[in-house]
Structures are given as structure tokens and as C-alpha cells.
Image (cartoon, rainbow, N blue to C red):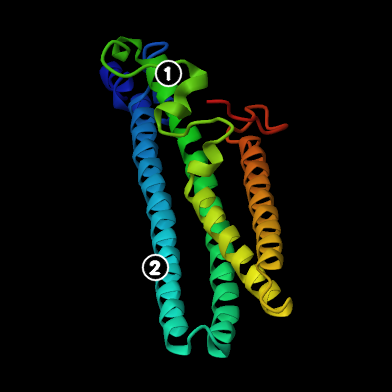
């Protein structure tokens, strides 16, 4: 026969119901470990997305810089002759393509970064809910401003301050330059035709890219990041 002391010992404590022995309202140690590990993982993921966006933008700017230097050398060597126009009409569309691709990936990385930041904001809310004594020592902000604390600002002109926005401006200028140069060749070197065509295409391309970025950010803001406990429908996180 098993002694009473043993019957009340580690048999129940080691089972799956051991969480019931915790004081009510106090988070269990596994939950704290999971939350801090997830926070650390999300911070690393944010750093990776920022690094990728910066690296892609650097490669794009390097390609643009090298291409324009080569174009200048061709212009000097050919005295802005046929070789210059042929080289420019190949180079500028190629740089524009690189710009469009870089813009698309930079936008995707920015959306991923915002998603990670939303999840980090939710975890910070969990910390303050479970340990309110930390509020005097950690930065506590209103729920609506938790993303701004992480460097994700909102506003009408914020899209131009992102990596994708910067790439969009340069890409639009390159596309406009290519079309303007082509229009100048077709119109027998008419400066007015070149400026009109180039300016129109550059403005249209920039407007389209910025509108695309704004739409992508709005769609990303509605992506659910919290599962409904009832299992019926996902909930949209609102950090």
C-alpha cells in the first residue's frame, strides 16, 4: 500500500494538470519563456527584413550609379552620337526593370517588418498586463501608438520615406528618362517632345507605384494576427 505522503507528492504535480496549482492570475513559467523567446525571434526577423531591404536598395543604387557613369563615358567617346543613343535605350529600360523589381521586394519586406512589429506590440501588451509593476521602468505607450515607438510612423508623406518609396522615385525618373530619350530620337531631337513625354511617364509611374504601396499597406493592416479562441474566425490584431 502506498503511503499517504507519497500519494500527495509528485505524482499529480508532474501530470498535465500541474498548472492548476499555480496562483490564479500568475503566468506560468512556460508561458513567460514562450513569450520572451517569441519576442526575441520577432526582433531577429525584423532585423533580417530591414537588412534585406537595405541590401537590395544598395545594389540598385550601385547599378544606377555604375550605369550612369558608363553612359557618361559613352557620351564623351561617341560625342553623343548613335552609339550613345543605342546604349542609353538599352541601359535605361534595364535599370528601370531592376528598379521595379527592387521596389516590389522592398515593399514586401516592409510589410513583413510591420507584421513582426504588430506581433511585438501584442507581446508588450502581454508583459504589461501580467506584470504591471514594470510600467514605471519600461516605456509604456497607448495601444494606438505602439507601432510608432518601434519606428513605424504613419502619415500622408510617410510612403516617400520608406525604402520602397525611395526606390519608386528613382525608378520613375529612370523610366521617364528612357521614354524621354526615345521621344527625342523619334521627334528629331525635339527638347519639348522629350521633356513632355519623359515628364508624363515619370509622373504616371510614380503615382502608380505610390498608389500601389498605399494599397499594399492598407491590405496588410487587415491581415489577422490573432486566432479567435472559439475557432470560428480570425481576429485582426490592433496594436
Local crowd size for mark 1, using a 10 Å CA cut-off: few (<14), some (14–19), many (≥20): few
Residue 58 visible to an observer of this rendering:
yes
- The answer to which of 123 and 23 lies nearer the viewer is 123
Viewer-proximal residue among 128 and 67: 67
Q: Which residue is mark 1?
A: 20
Report the residue at 62% width, 35% height from top. Answer: 221
Q: Which residue is mark 2?
A: 62
Kindly state the secondary structure of the residue where label 2 is placed: helix
Q: Position of residue 51 (x, y in %)?
A: 37, 54
At a point 39% along the width and 55% down the height, the residue shown is 54
Q: Residue at x 40, y 82 (%)?
A: 73
**Where, by quadrant of the figure, is residue 172 drawn?**
bottom right
Mark 1 element type: helix
The image shows residue 44 at horizontal and vertical percentages of 35, 46
The relative height of residue 119 versus residue 66 in the rendered view (above or below) is: above
Q: Mark number for residue 51?
A: none
**131 above or below 154?**
above
Amino acid at each position: 500500500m502506498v503511503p499517504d505522503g507519497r500519494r500527495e507528492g509528485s505524482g499529480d504535480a508532474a501530470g498535465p494538470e500541474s498548472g492548476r496549482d499555480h496562483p490564479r492570475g500568475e503566468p506560468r513559467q512556460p508561458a513567460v519563456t514562450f513569450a520572451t523567446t517569441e519576442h526575441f525571434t520577432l526582433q531577429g526577423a525584423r532585423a533580417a527584413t530591414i537588412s534585406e531591404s537595405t541590401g537590395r536598395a544598395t545594389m540598385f543604387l550601385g547599378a544606377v550609379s555604375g550605369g550612369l557613369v558608363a553612359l557618361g563615358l559613352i557620351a564623351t567617346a561617341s560625342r553623343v552620337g548613335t552609339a550613345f543613343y543605342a546604349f542609353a535605350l538599352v541601359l535605361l529600360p534595364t535599370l528601370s526593370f531592376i528598379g521595379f523589381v527592387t521596389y516590389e521586394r522592398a515593399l514586401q519586406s516592409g510589410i513583413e517588418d510591420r507584421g513582426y512589429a504588430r506581433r511585438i506590440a501584442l507581446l508588450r501588451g502581454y508583459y504589461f498586463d501580467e506584470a504591471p509593476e514594470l510600467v514605471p521602468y519600461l516605456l509604456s505607450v497607448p495601444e494606438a501608438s505602439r507601432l510608432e515607438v518601434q519606428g513605424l510612423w504613419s502619415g500622408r508623406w510617410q510612403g516617400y520615406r520608406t525604402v520602397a518609396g525611395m526606390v519608386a522615385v528613382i525608378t520613375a525618373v529612370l523610366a521617364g528618362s528612357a521614354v524621354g530619350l526615345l521621344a527625342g530620337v523619334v521627334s528629331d531631337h525635339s527638347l519639348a517632345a522629350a521633356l513632355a513625354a519623359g515628364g508624363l511617364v515619370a509622373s504616371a509611374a510614380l503615382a502608380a507605384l505610390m498608389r500601389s504601396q498605399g494599397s499594399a499597406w492598407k491590405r496588410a493592416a487587415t491581415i489577422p494576427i490573432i486566432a479567435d479562441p472559439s475557432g470560428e474566425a480570425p481576429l485582426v490584431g490592433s496594436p
